[in-house]
Amino acid sequence: MLKRLLFLLCGLALVTQAAAQRSSTALATTLADAYNAWRSAMIRKDAQAWASAITNYRQVVTRNEIVSSRKAFPEAVFTGAIEPPDLADMKMLEAEAGGTTAHLVYFGVADVEEKSGKNGAVLIKLKFGLEGGVWKFDSNRVTSLENAPTELKALESGQKPEFLNAPEFTPPGSFPPTPPLCRVPDFKAGFKLQSFGYETTLNMNGIDYPPVEHALDQQLIMGGLVRGKNEVTLRLKPAAPAEGQKPSVQLRIYKLDAAAPNKPGIEVLRWEAPTSGAPATITLPIQIE
């Protein structure tokens, strides 16, 4: 009886393992098809196909960045873009899904500009999102293996790398909320926010930026600046500073020349928190002529 039970358990384990392998293979095929649909749209410069193949989150983020840089959308999606790599000759290391997110990880030689280094060996991680029951491509990250000889040797010998168990190679389960569509600005703009002793969140044009705590952050402003009245709001929460460090918050906003990205910006706002303590919330007007 015991032998029979062990036999049944072993058989069940083999069936479960086979089912998992089939599931992983099916997922890999589905995700690869989604990537290739996006890749084809990019090569053909087909804006409608691109919009259908990419997640809504990435489409909105891309559109906001383009119009905020005073470029034409969707034309700028394809301007200067290198051809996405063909994965046919690369080795797939992993296909994994969690919640409404998934990824594919590939290893091999690909033409991905400077990322490939001298030996051309790279890791490519492709991210996907599930929308309306359909997997869509979201984004990719390319990592050169030029300065990772140990990992490169292991991969070339067929070993499964340990780094695939790291949190960054685990699908997060969900995407951040899709930001609102920003306005088309009259001027490109950016901010520099330095925050020590506070967790400071900047909101402008209806968009919240990630909180800054004990750090300096600088970013392009989505929706930029328009002629006339503009506003920026800061929300501040006290946070324990490093020993010997005085709490301080400084915000600078610049009007940028869209046609000359390397030209220094023109400062249009500078604000510093009072030494007596920062307010919990403050809204600052910016007048642009």
Image (tube, rainbow, N blue to C red):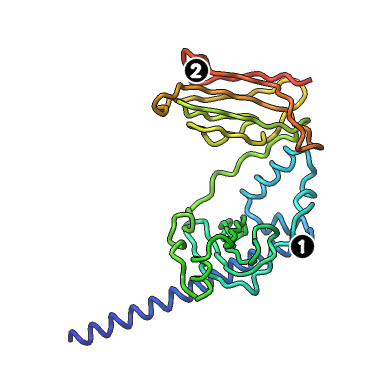
Residue 250 percent location from the top left of the image = 57, 23
Please give left or right for residue 6 compared with residue 132 in the image. left
Q: Which mark is residue 95?
A: none
Mark 2 is on which residue type? Answer: Pro
Mark 1 is on which residue type? Answer: Ile
Asked if 118 appears above or below 3 in the picture, the reply is: above
Confirm or deny contact between disc 1 and disc 2 (CB under 8 A).
no
Residue depicted at 30% across the width and 82% down the height: 10
Residue 129 percent location from the top left of the image = 57, 56
Q: Quadrant of the N terminus?
A: bottom left
Q: CA distance from mark 1 to mark 2?
A: 51 Å
Residue depicted at 75% across the width and 51% down the height: 77
Residue 81 percent location from the top left of the image = 75, 55
Q: Quadrant of the C terminus?
A: top right
Residue bearing mark 1: 43
Identify which residue, 104 or 91, lies in the foreground: 91
N-terminal label among 1 and 2? 1
Q: Residue furthest top?
A: 276
Residue bearing mark 2: 279
Residue depicted at 48% across the width and 53% down the height: 172
SS class of the residue under badge 2? Answer: loop
